[in-house]
Amino acid sequence: MMKKKLKIGLIGFGVVGQGLYDVLQKSPALDAEILSICVKNKKKRSLPDELFCYNPDEILNNGDINLVVELISDADEAYHIVKKSLLSGKDVVSANKKMIAENLEELIQIQKEKNVSLLYEASACGSIPVIRNLEEYYDNDLLLSVTGILNGSSNYILSKIFDHNKDYDSALKEAQELGFAEADPSFDVDGFDSLFKLIILTAHSFGTVVNPKDVLHYGISNISDFDIQYAKEKDFKIKLVGQVEKLENNKISLFVLPRLVKRDKYIYNVEDEFNGVVIKGLAYDKQFMFGKGAGGHPTGSAVLSDITAIAHNYRYEYKKMNYYSSFEYEKDVIIEIYLRYKKDEDLKKFKFDSISEEYNGPEYNYKIGLIKIKDLMALKDELRSMDIFIAVTRKTLNY
């Protein structure tokens, strides 16, 4: 049964907000109307002035609006808007992965108490319907792991490096000029964006809400020509990969790290601003989802899908939390890494369990060996300031 007509308050009219407005006009079957759009700045836009307001409370206090669509970049402001909307009995669609990852436990509780729906497919992997699939199709305990390229900006940069022989700085500049990377690109290239998406995917994969601050994430901003040359000589590409994996004894591990990827892996051929997610299960081995992870129209289409789902009274059931025993997040997991370094005092900070390969050169050195995630976590705040680069080389003991 369809809900009553959706009367939408849209908060944010940037790239995704405009993309949503465009795709909504192409969806005549959906009985939905945007009553008001909240923006920060008064400037001439292509739509009538009376459609716009400048204070979110005008939307939140409007009794005619039954669905709030939140599409702003400020995570703190988004949290207050989403929380207030849910508490006032309005359904919400959001694309703000940082806000959702940092407040997921509370937001799940409010949905339950107020009998409202918060959907956020667009917060992870743009146009790929990965959350809904994990929630509905992979809703049993056969799931083993979810691994993927979750950030289009860093993947675009790495594609230019490995497929077009550009250096990191010029590839980053090109990504910024095309709008794939921000003026301050650290959210993307240092792995924060992938981390928040991984937290959300973990909740729907294994029913466990993990604090983002407790998870190792390290990006590609420290990559050097030496690392690129090493990967090419060994016939690898470097990809920034987020992964959550089921371990024994009801435990899971998760982290975001660059990875040296072989040709035989699905994600080897995920290029430019595309995302790719590999879902591995006990009975079905591997399944691969691929699509555009960034841009106004791809993300706008994911928001539209959530709006349509709200019209059909859909909500996340958080099945893994409610129907299965929960998993415990484990940091005492061993992985094999490539560590490129310059100074011996930096190397001494890394507690390798064993070394399988090493090289000492005139400018850079590297070691490949086994190390515990928790020992890398202990260095988390220092990693970006050291003249080093880390990449996972292969799955090891706990995989």
Image: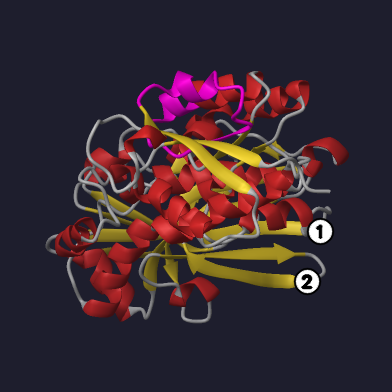
Name above or below for residue 244 compared with residue 395: above
Q: Residue 391 versus residue 149: which sits nearer the camera?
A: 149
Examine the image and state in which quarter residue 50 appears: top left
Q: Which residue does the image show at 21% across and 58% down from the upper left? A: 172
Q: Residues within 10 Å of mark 2 (few under 14, many from 20)?
A: few
Q: Which residue does the image show at 19% across and 63% down from the upper left? A: 174
Kindly indicate whether the residue at mark 2 contacts the one at mark 1 (C-beta within 8 angstroms): yes
Q: Residue 323's spot in the image, x, y percent?
A: 87, 40
Residue 200: image tag: none
Q: Which residue has dot 2 on it?
A: 284
Q: Which residue has dot 1 on it?
A: 142
Q: Which residue does the image show at 50% across and 57% down from the upper left? A: 25
- Image-based side of 219 in relation to 371, left or right: left
The answer to whether residue 21 is seen in the rendering is yes
The answer to whether residue 245 is seen in the rendering is no
Query: Which residue of the protein is positioned furthest toward the right in this rendering?
Result: 323
Q: Residue 350's spot in the image, x, y percent?
A: 38, 43
Q: Residue 70's spot in the image, x, y percent?
A: 49, 36
- Image-based side of 17 in relation to 141, left or right: left
How did the renderer colour the structure? secondary structure
Examine the image and state in which quarter residue 176 appears: bottom left
Q: Amino acid at mark 1?
A: Leu
Q: Which residue does the image show at 23% across and 40% down from the upper left? A: 44
- Secondary structure beneath label 2: loop
The range drawn in magenta is 54-79
Q: Residues within 10 Å of mark 1 (few under 14, many from 20)?
A: some
Of the 4 image quadrants, the one containing the C terminus is bottom right
- Image-based side of 83 in relation to 352, left or right: right
Name above or below for residue 399 compared with residue 383: below
Disc 1/disc 2 C-alpha distance (Å): 9 Å
